Image: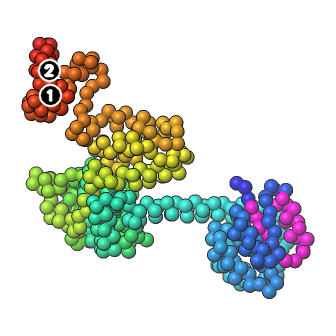
Amino acid sequence: MELNVLVVEERDMPVWEKARNYLKRKKIKLFSASTLREAYKILNREPINIVLSDFNLKNINSLNFLNKIKTIRPDVEIIFLSERVPLSKAIEAMKAGAYDFYEFPINMKLLMTVIEKAAEKQTLYIEKMKLEKKFKERVNYGNIIGRSKAMQYVIDIVASVASKNVNILLTGETGTGKEMIANAIHYSSSRSAKPYVKVNCAVFNEGILESELFGHEKGAFTGAAARRQGRFELANGGTIFLDEIADLPLGTQIKLLRILQEKEFERVGGNETIKVDVRVIAATNRDLKKLIDEGRFRDDLYYRLNVVKIELPALRERKEDFPLLASYFINKLNEEKGYKIKGISKEAMQTLLSYQWPGNVRELENALESAMALAKKDFIEASYLPAFLLMSEPEHSDYYRISHNLTLSEVERELIRLTLDKTNGNKTAAARALGIGLRSLHRKIKVIRAVPP
């Protein structure tokens, strides 16, 4: 990586000149400051990675200087160089956030190694901050996309219950964003600094799932070579998200019920009772009450999970959110994939609105990503959208869908049939809708009946 180093020193000492010359030979871009005012200006203006500073600056408290740098640029690493400094002062500087402290004389090769390691630490810090920012943006309930009444209702409930220590059941079709809502609840709660553990109950068979949830003791079953903590132990103090809860086997449901009621369990093959404090957020796209009637889900577990129920609306029920969602996904994919798409045409938007979206928000994002990958302009046009959207049945009742591989006479025949279906066999109404006379319609019907299917 390209390194930018700021050297802060007031005294014209040979050691500083030697250090500057050595760093220049290493192709490091150097900036120099002899006063704090100059140093602060450079830090605000330039992409400085490392500050090399004399610890014995005149009339300056070096620890205050360190704190000010960390306030301006918390990512920058500071290395102090000096002579005859008490060990207690060096330790104090390190505790305050200095990366390293060296006394003269300095081994230049060793100094270069320290600078490179400090730069690596800075890079990791910057990446960590970027990830945290991106993650917080994605989980904050204030950033859930939607101005429709249905989504505003969901956001209001999430904002209300996030801080309350209650179990939550999320329901809704696949792709409506149940995991995103679970994330928002956890990271907006008082448990946000504690563990957040996710389990998809549909992925494991019963034996493996119990081990995943509750852990196991060494020798509990073939292959159990060591004790293993389960997801509930790992989530202690925090939140566990149980996705696809409807797929939980009945035997495992009993053990989960005990945790919800008594906050305790035993590992598979163990006798030790383990106490836990875990908030449970469960999610499903199935009708749990129907499963209860069928004897496949326990009603007592249902009521323990369903303290607060949040039902996420299907995408087709919140069409007014489409412009917001399209804009959000276009910006997101531009950033992630390096695209330069500026927007979406009215025709393309109308195509999106005409589709029923069985895969919901997840399907919409995939469709837009496909269109952006195929786009030859900086705008998404209808022709760039996936073929299933272009061939789908429009939701408006005044549209018909007719296959493209019919002859003209076959198209006419199909159009007459569809119109008669729509008018419930009323030929007068059908003739009016087709823009032809009633006699013409009767004649065409006779021709149609004469033609073998």
Q: Is residue 15 magenta?
A: yes
Q: Locate residue 67, reporting x and y percent.
A: 66, 79
Q: Amino acid at mark 1?
A: Ala
What residue lies at 48% left-to-right and 36% top-to-bottom? 374
For residue 96, side relative to residue 386 (left or right): right
Which quadrant of the structure image shows residue 25?
A: bottom right
* The one of 367 and 6 positioned closer to us in this rendering: 367
The reply to whether discs 2 and 1 touch (Cβ–Cβ < 8 Å) is yes
Q: Which mark is residue 212?
A: none
Q: Locate residue 369, reporting x and y percent.
A: 44, 43
**Upstream in the sequence, badge 2 or badge 1?**
1
Question: Where 370 falls versus 60 (above or below)?
Answer: above
Question: Where 452 falls versus 141 (above or below)?
Answer: above
Measure the alpha-carbon separation of dots 2 and 1: 8 Å
Q: Secondary structure at mark 2?
A: helix
Residues drawn in magenta: 4-24
What residue lies at 36% left-to-right and 51% top-to-bottom? 322
Q: Secondary structure at mark 1?
A: helix
For residue 4, side relative to residue 351 (left or right): right
* The one of 256 and 130 positioned closer to us in this rendering: 130
What residue lies at 30% left-to-right and 35% top-to-bottom? 392
Question: Where 8 falls versus 393 (above or below)?
Answer: below
Quadrant housing the C terminus: top left
Q: Locate residue 57, reporting x and y percent.
A: 80, 81
What residue lies at 31% left-to-right and 48% top-to-bottom? 360
- Local packing at callout 1 (Cα closer than 10 Å; few below 14, some 14-19, many 20+) is many
For residue 15, side relative to residue 174 (left or right): right
* The one of 403 and 60 positioned closer to us in this rendering: 403
Q: Which residue is mark 1?
A: 431
* The one of 109 and 376 positioned closer to us in this rendering: 376
Q: Which residue is mark 2?
A: 440
